[in-house]
Image (cartoon, rainbow, N blue to C red):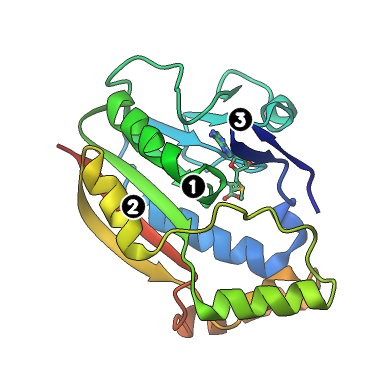
């Protein structure tokens, strides 16, 4: 498991290398293609890219300096999503995948306001965020009991679909799309066996669990 620490209240980390988990990797690729539909040739900024920037990102920032250092080059940098080092109207799309739960609840509005500031008129904010629920709680509990998961650093909690929509609506966006994502097969994604890659078709056909929510906002 990755290392993590708290910086200015945010939980920053070096997340696990997704490539080592074939099913998780396939699921994340599917998420990336859903996000791709909103890029449409414009300039894309990704915030909190972890260890794998979105393939369409023109610029990607991360609060954990080691992550940005590993990739190097002009298109990645260390920066905090709550205070972006970019001019107003600099991007057409801002993407944040699976990271808002690492920001204290009282700071999440700053993240969304910063996205609104750096987005051009009619820009899109695409947020993919974990959704709390019984299935997530149960499988995590089992994972920790069996020693399959490392230290729990999800101290600030995920956002319900409504909390996510309200966050976007209260900080400068009209919500234009929301979509639940997740299958009961997700716990198998912590396995490294190459065989799990073959489960992706079944995973797709069993989207019955609200594990994540994809929400897209358009600047007003
Ligand atoms: C669960 S990881 C997700 C990483 C990646 N987006 C993904 O989906 O695999 C959360 C990431 O958010 C980063 N992070 C947390 N707070 C941040 C902030 N305020 N600004 C930028 N990055 C932040 C962490 O360092 C970590 O890499």
Secondary element under disc 2, as helix, strand or loop, is loop
Q: Nearer the viewer, residue 141 or 96?
A: 141
Ligand 1 positioned in quadrant: top right
Q: Which mark is drawn over residue 63?
A: 3
Q: Is residue 92 above or below residue 126?
A: above
Query: Which residue carries the number 1 mark?
Result: 100
Q: Which mark is drawn over residue 37?
A: 2
Whether the residues at callouts 1 and 3 have beta carbons within 8 Å, the answer is: no
Secondary element under disc 1, as helix, strand or loop, is helix
**Label 2 CB, ligand 1: below 8 Å?**
no
Q: Nearer the viewer, residue 38 or 101?
A: 101
Q: Nearer the viewer, residue 10 or 189?
A: 10
Q: Quadrant of the N terminus?
A: bottom right
**Spot occupied by residue 106 in the image (x, y as percentages of width and height):** 43, 41
**Label 1 CB, ligand 1: below 8 Å?**
no
Tell me which residue sits at (56%, 83%) in the image.
184
Q: Nearer the viewer, mark 2 or mark 1?
A: 1
Which comes sooner in the sequence, label 3 or label 2?
Answer: 2
Between the C-alphas of marks 1 and 3, the distance is 12 Å
In the visual, does 202 lie left or right of 84?
right
Mark 2 burial class by Cα count in 10 Å: few <14, some 14-19, many 20+ = few
Tell me which residue sits at (29%, 18%) in the image.
88
Q: Is residue 158 visible?
A: yes
Which comes sooner in the sequence, label 2 or label 1?
Answer: 2
Which comes sooner in the sequence, label 1 or label 3?
Answer: 3
Secondary element under disc 3, as helix, strand or loop, is loop
Whether the residues at callouts 2 and 1 have beta carbons within 8 Å, the answer is: no
**Label 3 CB, ligand 1: below 8 Å?**
yes
């Amino acid at each position: 498991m990755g290392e993590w620490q708290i910086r200015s209240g945010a939980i920053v980390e070096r997340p696990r290398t997704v490539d080592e988990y074939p099913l998780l990797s396939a699921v994340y690729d599917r998420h990336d293609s859903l996000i791709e539909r909103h890029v449409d040739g414009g300039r894309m900024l990704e915030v909190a890219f972890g260890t794998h920037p979105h393939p369409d990102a023109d610029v990607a920032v991360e609060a954990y300096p080691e992550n940005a250092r590993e990739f190097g080059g002009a298109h990645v940098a260390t920066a905090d999503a709550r205070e972006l080092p970019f001019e107003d109207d600099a991007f057409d799309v801002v993407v944040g995948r699976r990271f808002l739960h690492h920001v204290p609840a009282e700071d999440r509005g700053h993240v969304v306001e910063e996205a609104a500031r750096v987005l051009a008129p009619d820009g899109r904010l695409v947020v993919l965020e974990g959704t709390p629920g019984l299935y997530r709680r149960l499988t995590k509990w089992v994972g920790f009991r069996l020693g399959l998961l490392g230290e729990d650093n999800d101290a600030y909690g995920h956002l319900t679909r409504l909390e996510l929509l309200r966050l976007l609506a209260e900080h400068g966006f009209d919500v234009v799309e929301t979509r639940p994502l997740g299958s009961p097969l997700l716990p198998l994604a912590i396995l490294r066996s190459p065989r799990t890659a073959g489960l992706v078709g079944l995973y797709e056909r069993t989207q019955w669990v609200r594990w994540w929510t994809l929400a897209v906002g358009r600047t007003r």
